Image (spheres, grey):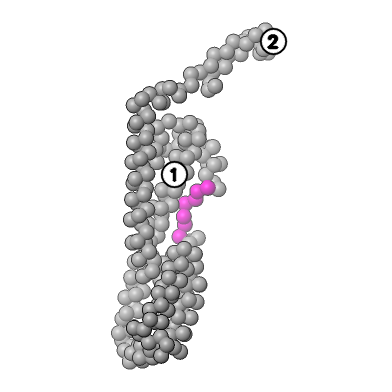
Amino acid sequence: MLLAIGTLWFWLFLATFLILEFLWIEAWENGIGATITLSVFLAIHWFWGDPSIFQWIGDNPETIAFGMLGYFVTGCVWGFVKWFLHLKEKAREYQEKRLEFLAGKGVKKADLSTPVPENLREDWRRYSQYKVARPKAAQNKSRIITWMAYWPWSAMWTMIRDPFVHAYNFCAERLEKMSAKVFNNIGFEQDHEIPPLDVTLGPDEKNADGGNIRYTGDR
């Protein structure tokens, strides 16, 4: 048996299978590809692996039935957990896009929690309609089913990836606050404030009723 349990070829084959499943499920988000890979893995193991595994499955139907029930229940629970984590991630992306918009509009001292001022909301709606959107479960059925069906891979990748993501976001926020504090202490904001202009025009620049045009605003 080329793929007998414990041999080098078996472990290489198993590692390749697990890596491909991680890629299909989390990187490429393709449940069909994951299912095809699983089917190929079982078929190869059927012909070149240890047949005692399949014999044990046939001899223990009750154990397999309870195992499948537990797998299904755990997958359903994980689907809710993963969807919640997905919403949290998308909510942060929304906050980051909003902060980017506010900074572009010159809103000072804005952070991730700063709401869009009322006078900028129409601009924000036009800006955000193609950049951010609220995720809807009905539009993510395939993704959610994949998380549920392949929850061991999905859960493992989440436990590996998310702590690093949270640590990075935490450090980035603290560094940004540190930068703002250091420069505010030396009067950076005051030095870069632009006072309004008050321009009195000459005779050739009168408005329709003969009065001077008064300009106030940024330079």
Q: Nearer the viewer, residue 101 or 17?
A: 17
For the N terminus, give its image quadrant.
Answer: bottom left
In the image, is residue 110 above or below residue 145? Answer: above
Magenta-colored stretch includes residue 135: yes
User: Mark 2, residues whose alpha carbon is within 10 Å: few (<14), some, or many (≥20)?
Assistant: few
Secondary structure under badge 1? helix
Q: Quadrant of residue 81?
A: bottom left
Inter-mark Cα distance, 2 to 1? 48 Å
- 9 in the magenta segment: no
Mark 2, secondary structure of its residue = helix
Q: Which mark is residue 96?
A: 1
Q: Is residue 210 visible?
A: no
Task: Give the residue type that dot 1 points to.
Answer: Glu
Percent x, y for residue 30?
A: 50, 68
First to last magenta residue range = 131-137
Q: Is residue 134 left or right of residue 187?
A: right
Q: Quadrant of the C terminus?
A: top right
Residue at numbered disc 2: 204
Instruction: Specify few, some or many for label 1: CA neighbours under 10 Å numbering under 14, 14-19, or 20 or more.
Output: some
Numbered tag placed on residue 136 in the rendering: none
Task: Tell me if I can see residue 203 in this picture.
Answer: yes
Residue located at (50% from left, 72% from top): 33
If you read the primary sequence from the N terminus, does the residue marked by circle 2 or circle 1 appear first? 1
Q: Residue 37: horizontal and vertical position, in percent?
A: 48, 76
Main SS, magenta residues: loop
